């Protein structure tokens, strides 16, 4: 390996921007090219590439003979994936001397797949993980190089987890690359942690519909899991859609018989809705109309 570790960077979005800022400052690392998602221009990465005289490329099939011949000329020591959306096959995985790695904002072997921060909140997790792992031909199944976890409190939501993940993904990826540089990786097979793990499916349009016939805790978690910059939880009231961005869960809210989805109280800036077990306070929302006690969400 040369004095500088030569990296091919497969990247997209803010996650990749933050990591680039760390990598480019390290004189022992040389980014030979940036490959962005085929359906994304990513003007920030394009500018970074231009500013630092790095080749900026994209291709609809990184496993094609054409692409492999293209990247061979860079003689990279390591391929790094950060929020890239194509599946790597064996030939390209093993092309660099140090192979290929990926950074994933999930506590592998759990929370593989998509939208994992949203799912962690929906599932009422008390922490989420960030993992750097070797890429294999599976999806988020390669041996773990480095993993760290971060607390989730009731004050957290999708936005706060994103902000933590943007910074920490960059930091953990950088630290993992330094371990690789110095030959200090002690990788862990995911099956040694749990033989099953699990995948999270992509959240699609329509999944934001809120079901009121749930516990207050479940509704609270659902609302904070898809708040801005997510689509926000949605419901219908008096024939109009309401977007709900924030709610408060009150542990000591009284439990009583009633109709889930009915407005049962109001304050100056919020309103209370009956759930299957108690009530929940809706504190931030978008609705074109007046909300009255007794109204029922559809």
Image: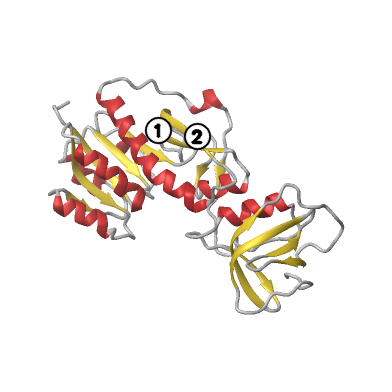
Q: CA distance from mark 1 to mark 2?
A: 9 Å
Q: Which mark is residue 287?
A: none
Query: Looking at the image, is mark 1 or mark 2 earlier in the sequence?
Result: 2
Residue of label 1: 133
Give above or below for 209 relative to 110. below
- Residue under the point 79% across and 72% down: 294
Point out the image quarter for the N terminus: top left
Secondary structure of residue under mark 2? loop
Residue at x-position 61% and y-position 49%: 122
Q: Position of residue 275 (x, y in %)?
A: 76, 58
Q: Would you place residue 52 above or below residue 102 in this image?
A: below
Q: Quadrant of the C terminus?
A: bottom right
Left or right, residue 30 beside residue 60: left
Residue 108: mark:
2
Q: Is residue 18 above or below residue 182?
A: below
Query: In this rendering, would 231 be left or right of 267?
Result: left
Q: Residue furthest front?
A: 268
Q: Examine the rendering and report whether any part of residue 99 can be seen.
A: no
Residue 39 percent coordinates (x, y): 34, 60
Q: Secondary structure at mark 1?
A: strand
Frontmost residue, 232 versus 160: 160
Q: Nearer the viewer, residue 216 or 51?
A: 216
Q: Is residue 270 visible?
A: yes
Q: Residues within 10 Å of mark 1 (few under 14, many from 20)?
A: many
Q: Residue furthest right?
A: 257
* Apparent side of residue 174 relative to residue 223 in the rendered image (left or right): left
């Amino acid at each position: 390996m040369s004095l500088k570790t030569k990296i091919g960077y497969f990247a997209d979005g803010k996650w990749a921007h933050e990591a680039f800022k760390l990598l480019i400052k390290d004189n022992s690392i040389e980014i030979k090219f940036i490959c962005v998602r085929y359906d994304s221009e990513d003007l920030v990465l394009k500018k970074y590439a231009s500013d630092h005289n790095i080749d900026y490329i994209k291709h609809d099939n990184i496993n094609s003979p054409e692409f492999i011949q293209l990247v061979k000329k860079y003689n990279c020591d390591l391929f790094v994936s950060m929020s890239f959306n194509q599946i790597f096959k064996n030939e390209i995985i093993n092309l660099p001397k140090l192979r290929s790695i990926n950074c994933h904002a999930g506590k592998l072997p759990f929370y593989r797949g998509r939208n994992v921060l949203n799912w962690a909140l929906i599932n009422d997790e008390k922490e989420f993980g960030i993992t750097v792992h070797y890429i294999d031909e599976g999806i988020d199944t390669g041996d773990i190089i480095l993993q760290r976890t971060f607390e989730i409190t009731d004050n957290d939501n999708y936005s706060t987890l994103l902000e933590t993940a943007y910074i920490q993904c960059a930091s953990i990826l950088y630290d993992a690359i330094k371990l690789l540089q110095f030959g200090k990786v002690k990788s862990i097979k995911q099956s040694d942690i749990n033989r099953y793990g699990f995948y999270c499916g992509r959240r699609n349009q329509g999944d934001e519909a809120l079901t009121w016939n749930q516990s207050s805790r479940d509704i609270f978690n659902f609302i904070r899991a898809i708040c801005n910059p997510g689509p926000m939880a949605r419901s219908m009231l008096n024939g109009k859609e309401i977007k709900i961005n924030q709610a408060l869960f009150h542990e000591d809210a009284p439990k009583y018989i009633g109709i889930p989805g009915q407005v049962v109280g109001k304050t100056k800036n919020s309103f209370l809705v009956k759930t299957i077990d108690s009530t929940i306070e809706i504190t931030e929302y978008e609705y074109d109309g007046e909300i009255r006690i007794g109204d029922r969400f559809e």
